[in-house]
Image (cartoon, rainbow, N blue to C red):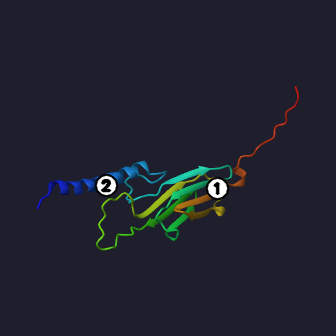
Amino acid sequence: MFRPLQDTQISLGALQDEMNQVFDRVWHGGLSTRPFDGQKWAPAIDVYERDDLYIVQVEMSGVDAKDVEVTHVGTSLTIRGERPNPFESQEGVQRLRGERRFGGFCRTIDLPDDIDAEKLSAKCQCGLLEISIPKIASSRPKAVKIEVQGE
């Protein structure tokens, strides 16, 4: 039996989910994840700079730290992992609304070349991955005391 209103709502809901996913990729694409790159989702990333180091923060809610890999090659930092859908394999569960994204992701960030890669460290707490990347000591700003002489 054809039910135009009910069938249309399901179709419009699916279309809305797809459009939300497209807009998420465009607006939250980040530094190097291009829209339409084939990923189902990509975590949001913030990058901060202090005098002595760079800090990269990655939203990782629903991702187990053991399922995340952070690698550094040259001036590129790559974060890859997977957020599993907890209901995907359960029978009798119907998704009524879908705003969260699941699946594998890979984000690559280009870093300046003044980093000390040997001292790179990462920690994950409360769904936030924080990567600390120290700067090479010689590239840090130095204060120079200026001697003022009387006029």
Quick one: 83 or 92, which is closer to the camera? 92
Could you tell me how far apart the alpha carbons at marks 2 and 1 are, in whole angstroms?
39 Å
Which quadrant is home to the N terminus?
A: bottom left
Looking at the image, do the residues carrying marks 2 and 1 touch, with CB atoms under 8 Å apart? no
The dot on residue 26 is none
* CA neighbours of label 2 inside 10 A, class few (<14), some (14 to 19), many (20+): some
Q: Position of residue 80 (x, y in %)?
A: 48, 64
Which quadrant is home to the C terminus?
A: top right
Position of residue 17 in the picture relative to residue 41 (left or right): left
What kind of residue is marked 1? Answer: Ile
The dot on residue 115 is 1
Image point (63%, 60%), residue name: 117
Position of residue 53 in the picture relative to residue 16 (left or right): right
The dot on residue 18 is 2
| Discs 2/1, front | 2
What kind of residue is marked 2? Answer: Glu
Label 1 secondary element: loop
Q: Position of residue 25 (x, y in %)?
A: 40, 52
Q: Position of residue 50 (x, y in %)?
A: 65, 50
Of pointers 2 and 1, the one earlier in the residue sequence: 2
Image point (41%, 68%), residue name: 84
Label 2 secondary element: helix
Q: Position of residue 48 (x, y in %)?
A: 59, 50
Looking at the rendering, which quadrant does residue 122 occupy?
bottom right
